[in-house]
Amino acid sequence: MDTAASKPAWLIPSLGLTQIVGWGSMFYAYGVLMQPMQTELQASKPVIVGAYSLALLISGLLSTLAGSIIDRVGGRLLMGAGTVLATVMLALLSTVNSVTGLYLIWACIGVAMSATLYQPAFAVITQIFEGGFRRAITMLTLFGGFASTVSWPLTQWLLEHYGWRETWVIYAVANLTICLPIHALLPRAASIKAKAKVHAADSVDLATVLREPSFYLITAAVTFNALVFSAMSLHLISILHDRGMTAYYAAGIGALIGPMQVLGRILEATFGKNATTRQIGLIAICLLPVALILLFAPAEWLLIYGLFAAMYGVGNGVMTIVRGALPAELYGREAYGAISGAMATPVTIAFAAGPFVASLLYAIGGGYPGAIVALIGIASLGAVLFFYATGHPRSETISSIR
């Protein structure tokens, strides 16, 4: 019987700690450190940002491979190797003196991301927690939700007191001393595979799933959702200024989003615990286009903009869980790593492309109002595709392709 009590109590908080360190050092810290790096390397901002985008692209392209490795041998080897690679690359980042070196290092950091961040962690806990995988994913994302809260002020403090090169060294040491020991303690592959055989009849492999049209519709749905959220994340403050909001209030609205993401995950773990992932996902994915409509309210309607931040943050916080849990609910856990990795590839690319897409829509639409209308359309299309693709029981869709 699969009970929470039979699982190691240290696993979720420990893996959560690795997510805070991993996301903080490889994802969020660059937003603070890239300005002094740009100055010292004498490069343009698009060039500096491009190195980071390359890492996200490589991470996305390797998602399926990383998931397949975890399906076969568990997460200990892959996540441990990814942490070692992250340690070395972050240390080398402190020595970079050229744009070429910057791009090479970030390319390798992209490999480390694919082996250590949410997607491989989701695969590991889905193997270990069996029927309780969704609750375990929710708990893990609660920890991960604090990565930006910790990293941004910490990175700024480290930058002011030590400089950007020393800050990267400190983050390298954090990965080595905090993440590597935890990853080394993950359950052995043999014990995971033995348990997985019991549930193999309830699962399908990646090749079977890739013949199912609904897989592509679901993947497109979550990709459109991720694209819009990523586009908004960089442009939101500018949009609020464009609507006539003061810098003070715009920053306040933006600051609400992080806590609302955590609130969304808490609500999913409490009020939504008896609903299926598909039901939760449909609600969450519909929140984004509705929230964007609220951006057309007058700037002085601060309560409406507060509601926007709540809907926008809650929706994205819950969609992180949905993207992690839905593949297991639809297709079983035997090939979860490969299937979720295949779904994550376009999502990660969308996260990397989102800010550029928003800039393009801004230029084509003649300003932010036109861009927002286009983003509402993309988000709505994602919601429609999700509703259509998840509207049939798994037994019907899978049986049709076997």
Image (cartoon, helix red, strand yellow):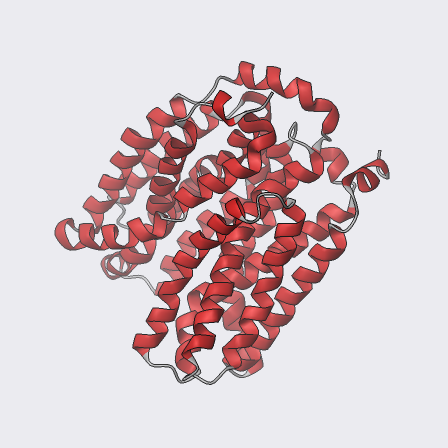
How many numbered tags mark residues here? 0
Residue 193 percent coordinates (x, y)? 60, 18
Task: Work out which quarter of the rendered image holds the C terminus and state it.
Answer: top right
Is residue 182 toward the left or the right of residue 288 in the image? left
Closer-to-camera residue (50/315): 315
Considering only vertical position in the picture, is 132 above or below 216?
A: above
Left or right: residue 162 versus residue 383 is left
The residue nearer to you, when weighing 192 against 132, is 132
Residue 56, position as x, y percentages in the image? 47, 49
Residue 199 visible in image? yes
Residue at horizontal 76 percent and vertical 48 percent from the top: 214
Q: Is residue 213 above or below residue 387?
A: above
Q: Determine whether, in the image, residue 197 is placed left or right of residue 214.
A: left
Image spot of residue 257 (x, y percent): 42, 62
Q: Is residue 146 shown above or below 252?
A: above
Please report the residue visible at 48 percent of the width from the left and 66 percent of the height from the top: 232
- Residue drawn 59% across the image and 41% down it: 325
The quadrant where residue 15 appears: top left
* Residue 70 visible to the viewer: no
Point 50% across, 42% down: residue: 138
